[in-house]
Image (spheres, grey):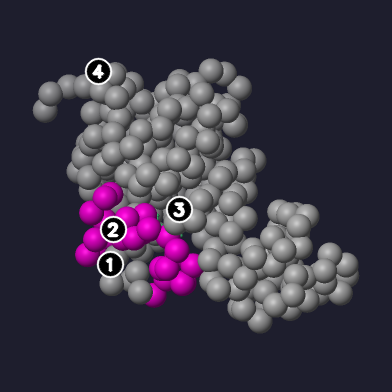
Amino acid sequence: MPPPARNAAGQERLVADLRAAGCVFAEDEAAVLLASTDDPAELAALLARRVAGEPLEQVVGWAQFGAVRVPVEPGVFVPRQRSRLLVDLALATVPAPRTVVDLCCGSGALGAAVAAALAGPLELHAADLDAAAVRCATRTLEPFGGRVHRGDLYDALPGELRGRVDLLLVNAPYVPTVAIGLMPPEARLHEPRTALDGGTDGLDLHRRVAAGAPGWLAPGGALVLETSEDQAERTAAAVRAAGLDPRVHRCADLDATAVVGVRPPGPRTLA
Ligand code: GLN
Protein backbone atom coordinates (compact mmCIF):
# COMPACT_ATOMS: atom_id res chain seq x y z
CA MET A 1 0.00 0.00 0.00
CA PRO A 2 1.23 3.58 -0.64
CA PRO A 3 2.69 5.45 2.36
CA PRO A 4 -0.01 7.16 4.45
CA ALA A 5 0.09 10.97 4.00
CA ARG A 6 0.63 13.13 7.08
CA ASN A 7 -2.41 15.33 6.39
CA ALA A 8 -5.92 14.97 7.81
CA ALA A 9 -6.96 12.58 5.03
CA GLY A 10 -3.82 10.49 5.58
CA GLN A 11 -4.50 10.34 9.30
CA GLU A 12 -8.08 9.20 8.66
CA ARG A 13 -6.75 6.46 6.36
CA LEU A 14 -4.31 5.37 9.03
CA VAL A 15 -7.12 5.14 11.62
CA ALA A 16 -9.33 3.28 9.14
CA ASP A 17 -6.56 0.78 8.30
CA LEU A 18 -5.93 0.14 12.00
CA ARG A 19 -9.62 -0.23 12.72
CA ALA A 20 -10.06 -2.65 9.82
CA ALA A 21 -7.21 -4.71 11.30
CA GLY A 22 -9.18 -4.99 14.57
CA CYS A 23 -7.38 -2.34 16.66
CA VAL A 24 -9.93 -1.14 19.21
CA PHE A 25 -8.06 2.06 20.11
CA ALA A 26 -7.29 2.96 16.49
CA GLU A 27 -7.09 6.76 17.06
CA ASP A 28 -4.65 6.36 19.95
CA GLU A 29 -2.55 3.88 18.02
CA ALA A 30 -2.49 6.18 14.96
CA ALA A 31 -1.22 9.01 17.15
CA VAL A 32 1.56 6.79 18.55
CA LEU A 33 2.59 5.65 15.06
CA LEU A 34 2.59 9.24 13.74
CA ALA A 35 4.69 10.40 16.69
CA SER A 36 7.22 7.62 16.05
CA THR A 37 8.52 8.71 12.67
CA ASP A 38 8.56 11.60 10.20
CA ASP A 39 9.39 9.31 7.30
CA PRO A 40 6.31 8.22 5.26
CA ALA A 41 7.97 5.01 4.07
CA GLU A 42 8.87 4.04 7.64
CA LEU A 43 5.35 4.91 8.79
CA ALA A 44 3.97 2.56 6.13
CA ALA A 45 6.32 -0.19 7.30
CA LEU A 46 5.29 0.26 10.95
CA LEU A 47 1.60 0.23 9.96
CA ALA A 48 2.10 -2.97 7.97
CA ARG A 49 3.68 -4.70 10.98
CA ARG A 50 0.85 -3.57 13.26
CA VAL A 51 -1.82 -4.62 10.75
CA ALA A 52 -0.11 -8.04 10.56
CA GLY A 53 -0.71 -8.42 14.31
CA GLU A 54 2.48 -7.36 16.09
CA PRO A 55 1.83 -5.50 19.38
CA LEU A 56 2.02 -1.72 18.91
CA GLU A 57 4.73 -1.43 21.57
CA GLN A 58 7.01 -3.88 19.76
CA VAL A 59 6.34 -2.08 16.46
CA VAL A 60 7.35 1.36 17.75
CA GLY A 61 9.93 -0.08 20.16
CA TRP A 62 8.68 1.40 23.43
CA ALA A 63 5.84 1.33 25.96
CA GLN A 64 4.66 3.95 28.40
CA PHE A 65 4.36 2.51 31.91
CA GLY A 66 3.22 5.10 34.44
CA ALA A 67 5.87 7.81 34.45
CA VAL A 68 8.49 5.77 32.59
CA ARG A 69 8.97 4.95 28.92
CA VAL A 70 10.56 1.55 28.45
CA PRO A 71 12.16 0.00 25.36
CA VAL A 72 10.36 -3.07 24.02
CA GLU A 73 12.11 -5.10 21.33
CA PRO A 74 10.22 -7.56 19.12
CA GLY A 75 9.64 -10.75 21.12
CA VAL A 76 9.73 -9.03 24.51
CA PHE A 77 6.78 -9.12 26.94
CA VAL A 78 4.83 -5.85 26.71
CA PRO A 79 4.35 -4.23 30.13
CA ARG A 80 0.66 -4.25 31.08
CA GLN A 81 -0.94 -1.18 32.63
CA ARG A 82 -2.46 -3.47 35.28
CA SER A 83 1.01 -4.07 36.69
CA ARG A 84 1.06 -0.46 37.94
CA LEU A 85 -0.78 -1.91 40.94
CA LEU A 86 2.48 -3.61 41.98
CA VAL A 87 4.31 -0.27 41.96
CA ASP A 88 1.65 1.36 44.17
CA LEU A 89 1.58 -1.58 46.58
CA ALA A 90 5.37 -1.78 46.77
CA LEU A 91 5.74 1.89 47.71
CA ALA A 92 2.80 1.77 50.13
CA THR A 93 4.33 -1.26 51.91
CA VAL A 94 7.99 -0.17 51.93
CA PRO A 95 8.05 3.61 51.29
CA ALA A 96 11.83 4.05 51.49
CA PRO A 97 13.51 0.88 50.14
CA ARG A 98 17.29 0.79 49.83
CA THR A 99 17.51 -2.40 47.78
CA VAL A 100 14.99 -3.35 45.12
CA VAL A 101 14.90 -6.44 42.90
CA ASP A 102 12.68 -6.86 39.83
CA LEU A 103 12.56 -10.62 39.17
CA CYS A 104 11.22 -11.91 35.80
CA CYS A 105 11.78 -8.29 34.79
CA GLY A 106 11.00 -8.40 31.06
CA SER A 107 11.61 -4.84 29.84
CA GLY A 108 12.36 -3.68 33.42
CA ALA A 109 9.22 -1.55 33.73
CA LEU A 110 8.45 -2.38 37.38
CA GLY A 111 11.95 -1.64 38.68
CA ALA A 112 12.15 1.58 36.69
CA ALA A 113 8.73 2.79 37.86
CA VAL A 114 9.65 2.21 41.52
CA ALA A 115 13.05 3.87 41.07
CA ALA A 116 11.45 6.85 39.29
CA ALA A 117 9.09 7.39 42.23
CA LEU A 118 11.90 7.51 44.81
CA ALA A 119 14.03 10.50 45.66
CA GLY A 120 16.89 8.84 47.55
CA PRO A 121 19.70 6.54 46.37
CA LEU A 122 18.74 3.00 45.53
CA GLU A 123 20.46 -0.29 44.80
CA LEU A 124 18.44 -1.74 41.95
CA HIS A 125 18.77 -5.20 40.40
CA ALA A 126 16.68 -7.00 37.80
CA ALA A 127 16.80 -10.47 36.29
CA ASP A 128 15.24 -12.40 33.46
CA LEU A 129 15.79 -15.67 31.61
CA ASP A 130 15.41 -14.12 28.18
CA ALA A 131 18.32 -12.40 26.40
CA ALA A 132 16.15 -9.83 24.57
CA ALA A 133 14.41 -8.91 27.83
CA VAL A 134 17.78 -8.47 29.55
CA ARG A 135 18.89 -6.16 26.68
CA CYS A 136 15.74 -4.01 27.07
CA ALA A 137 15.90 -3.93 30.86
CA THR A 138 19.57 -2.91 30.74
CA ARG A 139 18.59 0.16 28.71
CA THR A 140 15.56 0.82 30.95
CA LEU A 141 17.47 0.69 34.23
CA GLU A 142 20.64 2.43 33.08
CA PRO A 143 19.42 5.92 34.14
CA PHE A 144 18.75 4.52 37.63
CA GLY A 145 22.10 2.79 37.97
CA GLY A 146 20.35 -0.60 37.91
CA ARG A 147 22.13 -3.88 37.16
CA VAL A 148 20.43 -6.55 35.07
CA HIS A 149 21.30 -10.23 35.34
CA ARG A 150 20.39 -13.11 33.06
CA GLY A 151 19.29 -16.40 34.56
CA ASP A 152 16.60 -18.50 36.20
CA LEU A 153 14.86 -16.64 39.07
CA TYR A 154 17.13 -16.26 42.13
CA ASP A 155 20.02 -18.13 40.43
CA ALA A 156 20.60 -14.95 38.45
CA LEU A 157 21.11 -12.71 41.50
CA PRO A 158 24.43 -11.88 43.16
CA GLY A 159 24.67 -13.80 46.44
CA GLU A 160 25.47 -10.64 48.40
CA LEU A 161 21.79 -9.64 48.07
CA ARG A 162 20.68 -12.50 50.35
CA GLY A 163 18.73 -11.21 53.32
CA ARG A 164 19.03 -7.60 52.09
CA VAL A 165 16.17 -7.06 49.61
CA ASP A 166 13.59 -4.51 50.80
CA LEU A 167 11.31 -4.93 47.79
CA LEU A 168 11.05 -7.99 45.60
CA LEU A 169 8.84 -7.11 42.60
CA VAL A 170 7.70 -10.08 40.57
CA ASN A 171 5.51 -10.39 37.52
CA ALA A 172 6.27 -14.05 36.81
CA PRO A 173 4.34 -16.00 34.18
CA TYR A 174 1.07 -17.24 35.69
CA VAL A 175 -1.16 -18.25 32.77
CA PRO A 176 -2.19 -21.93 33.04
CA THR A 177 -0.78 -23.84 30.06
CA VAL A 178 -4.25 -24.69 28.70
CA ALA A 179 -5.24 -21.00 28.71
CA ILE A 180 -2.31 -19.83 26.56
CA GLY A 181 -4.29 -20.70 23.42
CA LEU A 182 -7.08 -18.35 24.54
CA MET A 183 -4.80 -15.31 24.84
CA PRO A 184 -4.96 -12.58 22.17
CA PRO A 185 -2.67 -13.22 19.17
CA GLU A 186 -0.47 -10.27 20.20
CA ALA A 187 0.52 -12.26 23.29
CA ARG A 188 0.28 -15.80 21.90
CA LEU A 189 2.30 -15.14 18.77
CA HIS A 190 4.60 -12.27 19.69
CA GLU A 191 5.54 -12.70 23.34
CA PRO A 192 7.80 -15.46 24.60
CA ARG A 193 6.03 -18.49 25.99
CA THR A 194 8.43 -18.34 28.95
CA ALA A 195 6.92 -14.95 29.90
CA LEU A 196 3.35 -16.27 29.99
CA ASP A 197 3.16 -20.01 30.71
CA GLY A 198 2.97 -20.77 34.44
CA GLY A 199 2.48 -24.55 34.06
CA THR A 200 -0.58 -26.74 34.63
CA ASP A 201 -2.31 -24.51 37.20
CA GLY A 202 -0.30 -21.40 36.30
CA LEU A 203 1.36 -21.31 39.71
CA ASP A 204 4.62 -23.21 39.16
CA LEU A 205 6.65 -20.00 39.21
CA HIS A 206 4.67 -18.51 42.11
CA ARG A 207 5.51 -21.52 44.27
CA ARG A 208 9.22 -21.24 43.39
CA VAL A 209 9.29 -17.45 43.85
CA ALA A 210 7.51 -17.71 47.20
CA ALA A 211 9.72 -20.54 48.47
CA GLY A 212 12.87 -18.55 47.72
CA ALA A 213 11.69 -15.13 48.89
CA PRO A 214 12.33 -15.34 52.66
CA GLY A 215 16.01 -16.06 52.07
CA TRP A 216 16.48 -12.91 49.98
CA LEU A 217 14.20 -10.45 51.77
CA ALA A 218 15.48 -8.16 54.51
CA PRO A 219 13.50 -8.21 57.78
CA GLY A 220 10.37 -6.18 57.07
CA GLY A 221 10.96 -6.53 53.31
CA ALA A 222 8.10 -7.36 50.98
CA LEU A 223 7.46 -9.70 48.07
CA VAL A 224 4.98 -8.08 45.64
CA LEU A 225 3.65 -10.66 43.23
CA GLU A 226 1.17 -10.20 40.37
CA THR A 227 -1.53 -12.83 40.03
CA SER A 228 -5.11 -13.12 38.76
CA GLU A 229 -8.35 -12.83 40.71
CA ASP A 230 -9.01 -16.57 40.24
CA GLN A 231 -5.54 -17.61 41.34
CA ALA A 232 -5.05 -15.09 44.16
CA GLU A 233 -5.93 -17.38 47.08
CA ARG A 234 -3.60 -20.08 45.79
CA THR A 235 -0.79 -17.58 45.21
CA ALA A 236 -1.35 -16.30 48.78
CA ALA A 237 -1.26 -19.88 50.09
CA ALA A 238 2.14 -20.43 48.46
CA VAL A 239 3.41 -17.19 50.04
CA ARG A 240 2.05 -18.26 53.46
CA ALA A 241 3.60 -21.71 53.13
CA ALA A 242 6.97 -20.00 52.62
CA GLY A 243 6.61 -18.24 55.99
CA LEU A 244 5.63 -14.76 54.79
CA ASP A 245 2.49 -12.95 55.86
CA PRO A 246 0.38 -12.59 52.67
CA ARG A 247 -2.34 -10.13 51.78
CA VAL A 248 -4.37 -10.12 48.55
CA HIS A 249 -5.02 -6.77 46.86
CA ARG A 250 -7.43 -6.14 44.01
CA CYS A 251 -7.84 -3.01 41.88
CA ALA A 252 -10.99 -3.10 39.75
CA ASP A 253 -9.99 -0.02 37.72
CA LEU A 254 -6.78 -1.67 36.54
CA ASP A 255 -8.33 -5.16 36.53
CA ALA A 256 -5.31 -6.12 38.60
CA THR A 257 -4.65 -8.50 41.47
CA ALA A 258 -1.49 -8.87 43.51
CA VAL A 259 -0.28 -10.61 46.63
CA VAL A 260 2.02 -8.82 49.06
CA GLY A 261 3.98 -11.04 51.45
CA VAL A 262 5.98 -9.36 54.19
CA ARG A 263 8.91 -10.97 55.98
CA PRO A 264 8.36 -10.34 59.69
CA PRO A 265 10.70 -7.67 61.08
CA GLY A 266 13.36 -8.80 63.50
CA PRO A 267 15.80 -11.68 63.31
CA ARG A 268 14.67 -14.94 61.82
CA THR A 269 13.92 -17.56 64.44
CA LEU A 270 14.40 -21.22 63.87
CA ALA A 271 11.13 -23.10 64.05
N1 GLN B 1 -2.74 -12.39 32.37
C1 GLN B 1 -1.50 -11.73 32.16
C2 GLN B 1 -1.59 -10.75 31.02
O1 GLN B 1 -1.57 -11.06 29.87
C3 GLN B 1 -0.36 -12.66 31.97
C4 GLN B 1 0.88 -11.99 32.31
C5 GLN B 1 1.81 -12.93 33.06
O2 GLN B 1 1.71 -14.14 32.97
N2 GLN B 1 2.63 -12.36 33.84
O3 GLN B 1 -1.73 -9.60 31.32
Mark 3 CB in 8 Å range of ligand 1? no
Q: Does label 1 or label 2 sit earlier along the sequence?
A: 1
Q: Locate residue 232: give its quadrant.
A: bottom left
Considering only vertical position in the picture, is 50 above or below 118? below
Could one spot residue 222 in this view of the protein? Answer: no
* Residue position for label 2: 198
Considering only vertical position in the picture, is 39 above or below 220? below
Q: Is residue 52 left or right of residue 104?
A: right
Calculate the distance from the C-alpha at mark 1 to the C-alpha at mark 4: 39 Å
> Residue at horizontal 41%, vertical 32%?
148
* Residue position for label 4: 267
Name the amino acid type tagged 3.
Val
Name the amino acid type tagged 2.
Gly
* Residue position for label 1: 177
* Residue position for label 3: 76
* Disc 1 element: helix
The quarter of the picture where the C terminus appears is top left
Magenta region, residue range: 182-206
Q: Mark 2 and mark 1 in contact (Cβ < 8 Å)? A: yes
Q: Mark 2 and mark 4 in contact (Cβ < 8 Å)? A: no
* Disc 3 element: loop
Q: Mark 4 and mark 3 in contact (Cβ < 8 Å)? A: no
Calculate the distance from the C-alpha at mark 3 to the C-alpha at mark 4: 39 Å
> Residue at horizontal 33%, vertical 37%?
150
Badge 3 local density, few (<14 within 10 Å), some, or many (20+)?
A: many
> Residue at horizontal 36%, vertical 54%?
195
Q: Does label 1 or label 3 sit earlier along the sequence?
A: 3
